[in-house]
Image: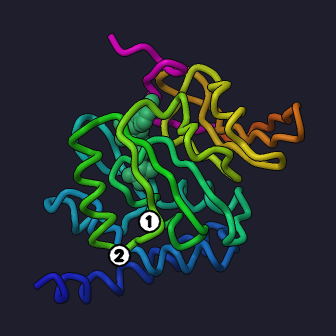
Amino acid sequence: MAGAVDGQMGGARRRLVELLRDKGIRDLAVLRAFDLTPRHAFVPTGLRHRAYEDSSLPIGSGQTISQPSIHARYLELLGLKGHERVLEVGTGSGYQTVLLSHLVAQVFTIERIASLFSMARDAINRAGATNVSMLMGDGTVGWREYAPYDAILVSAGGPGVPPALIEQLTDGGRLLIPVGTREEQTLKLIAKHGESHVVSDVAPVRFVPLFGTQGWEQH
Ligand code: SAM
């Protein structure tokens, strides 16, 4: 049965890849990762028919799987070559985690909500990704044990850039994080050079809040 569903979804997935190309995504490795990753396996069953729309969808606990073109933009901006060790803050459904698993050597991912963590773990295993390490906890403090990381992607919007994440970048490493209010943010790209770092504004974005020690306080 799962095979039949996967078959029906294959055409929709290829159309999504075409759409991403039309929206200006040029990195072939990123487009290939979208072609290899079954987004319908990361959304609630009742929303599977919408899995290949370019829209964010609810995944439970008030959280969302982000819009595919936002994921694609994030991944393209990092210019990944394949050898990197990457930290993802905000596993959510695990979809971007699996996209990353096709693009880098090792993915470390952190999610703070227990129910999402376990659903994502199952979906990531079913997708066959073997280069993913998962932690349940507060990603605003990073994952010191395996630092430094060549790239860090934060999938939720914070009031500022958590210093722990900059500390845990390699020299030459890059951090992508939405920063602003709880409602709207600017996507920031931070490039670390030795002891200093350069911050560039990429685009206005809207992400769910980044809660935690170095994020928003949860009331
Ligand atoms: N990229 C994900 C996907 O493909 O499904 C979507 C991520 S969703 C927009 C943001 C996630 O960040 C939510 O699951 C939320 O629980 C998580 N989150 C928020 N604050 C966090 C924190 N301090 N540490 C870890 N995860 C956090």
How is the model colour-coded?
rainbow
Q: Which of pointers 1 and 2 lies earlier in the amino acid sequence?
A: 1
Residue at 82% x, 40% y: name it: 192
Residue type at the position of mark 1: Val
Residue at 53% x, 64% y: name it: 100
Q: Which residue is disc 1 drawn over?
A: 98
The furthest residue to the top: 219
Q: Nearer the viewer, residue 31 or 135?
A: 135
- Image quarter for residue 82? bottom right
Residue type at the position of mark 2: Gly
Q: Nearer the viewer, residue 40 or 23?
A: 40
Q: Quadrant of the N terminus?
A: bottom left
Look at the image and say whether residue 2 sits in the magenta stretch.
Answer: no
Q: Which residue is disc 2 drawn over?
A: 128
Q: Nearer the viewer, residue 215 or 22?
A: 215
Residue at 70% x, 57% y: name it: 78
The relative height of residue 40 versus residue 204 in the rendered view (above or below) is below
Query: What separation in Å lies between label 1 and label 2 (alpha carbons)?
Result: 9 Å
Helix, strand, or loop for circle 2? loop
Residue 71, horizontal then vertical, whole percent = 53, 57
How packed mark 1 is, by other alpha carbons closer than 10 Å (few <14, some 14-19, many 20 or more), is many
Q: Quadrant of the C terminus?
A: top left
Asked whether residue 208 appears in the rendered view, the answer is no
Magenta portion: prevailing SS class: loop
Mark toward the viewer: 1 or 2: 2
Is the CB–ligand 1 distance for label 1 below 8 Å? no
Magenta-colored span: 204-219
